[in-house]
Image: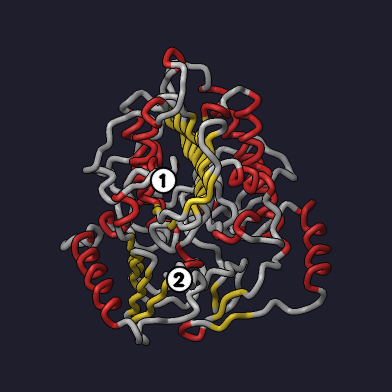
Amino acid sequence: MLVWVVGLSVGISQLGLAVDEDKLEMPNIVLFFIDDLGWADLGVNGSTFYETPELDKLAKGGVNFTDSYSANPVCSPTRAALMAGKAPQRLGITQWIHQPSKIHLQSEEVTLAESLQKHGYVTGYIGKWHLGEKDEQMPTAQGFSWMRAVNRAGQPASYYFPYNNKRKGGVWDVPDLDGGKEGDYLTDVMTDLAIEFIDENMGKDEPFYLNFAHYAVHTPIQPPMELVAKYEEKRKRMYGDSATPKIVDRYGTYSRGRQDNVDYAAMMENLDMNVGRVMAHLEKNDLLEDTLIIFTSDNGGLCHSRKSSVSCNLPLRSGKGWMYEGGIRVPHIVSWKGKLVPRVCDVPTITMDVFPTILELAGLPLEKEHHLDGESMKAAMMGEKSAVLDERFIAWTYPHRHGNGHRPSHAIRKDGWKLIRFESGLRYELYHLLEDMGETKNLAFENSKKVAEMDELLTEWLEETTPETPIFK
């Protein structure tokens, strides 16, 4: 899941906006990367059970990208794509990283942080990393000079102080928070750290870049307890005593049929409130009008499972771990107070686009050899036509089984069409997303020519982006 906040003044004149040239300076950047946040988890995208007033306000005051995608339906590959600007398979990371593991983001990759650091940025990282567990694989070895609350696993041991779990071992524990007290909640405390970083670095000659990667709303589902009763009452009011419906899906799995998990709803409201805290702090310090805010996620919401589920991504199909829209379509909001015209944008974007977009908006040279698979979203943000963005295809590969029942598959989207190719069972599913965003009608049988055309593009992309020699053997 991801929110990035980019304080902007450098490069503003290049965007065609009226500015005082004497006040131009390098932008500050704050990038929030939210974990497992589904596209439909936000009120502005249709949720009626979860309450996200701060994020809804952000979307209505900026550009709400309705067709934005994660690079992969699970976390580690998408996080690698964000850092390196490349398709996950180029980096040898196509599955979430099980600890312990030899798989990690390689030090030879030039990350977004390293690119900004060489231009004078002070760089900081808070929260989930999940791209390596050894000291030489952590954020401090990938361009971040300041690091807090980064554990060596893919989720926290606990959201409650002291954020550990003796049964799971230290790899799950969240470090750097020993000074807390009983009752402290992880998402709140991490926001305290973000505000601390901003306060330490604002007003200095060097700009700062903070990557704020919340653990929320990933499991364990442990809410701030003071909010639970509110959603218990709301669930009763909306649904009475009825059981949560189930939607039967491929391979004998099912997904959750509505949003009614009270604990998850409480975690969502708390996350929303903490995004609002950062926004309020930026405004209080006169930074908001020079700040570009982008909000997105690392994959779709967790709703599809054999045994249990957390959320519901309807009207999208399925969820985390699947190539259906619920697994890869994610929230993506861009807001720039007073400078960016609010609009809804349906230009498809993907995680790798973040790297070149930040560089271009910061007035820095693009580095195509590094962000090889990303394109700048600047034109789409400004409401301009872009042949590159409009005519390209975007594609995914998840060549693994997942505990929720997924079996290896690959997908491609172009011109509103989406093809999913499975390696077992019915091979092809074809959907026209502009008419069927819920992927309810498989058009593959009646559009064999379109299937062949897109399948060829997908095969070529896989061959081009997959190393002949595996990076990790």
Task: Kindly identify which residue carries mark 2.
Answer: 324
Badge 2 vs badge 1, beta-carbon distance below 8 Å? no
Q: Quadrant of the C terminus?
A: bottom left
Q: Is residue 276 above or below residue 442?
A: above
Left or right, 397 with reference to 280: left
Q: Which mark is residue 380?
A: 1
Q: Nearer the viewer, residue 282 or 78?
A: 282
**Three-letter residue code for mark 1:** Ala
Q: Residue at x 45, y 63 (%)?
A: 328
Q: Amino acid at mark 2?
A: Tyr
Judged from this view, the residue extending furthest toward the top is 22
Q: Where residue 373 sits: x, y (%)?
A: 28, 51
Residue sitting at 42 percent across and 72 percent down? 432
Above or below for 233 versus 215:
below
Quarter location, residue 342: top right
Residue 224 in view here? yes
Sort mark 1 into few (<14), some (14-19) or many (20+) by Cα contacts within 10 Å.
Answer: some
Q: Give the Cα distance between marks 2 and 1.
A: 24 Å
Vertical comparison of 31 with 421: above or below: above
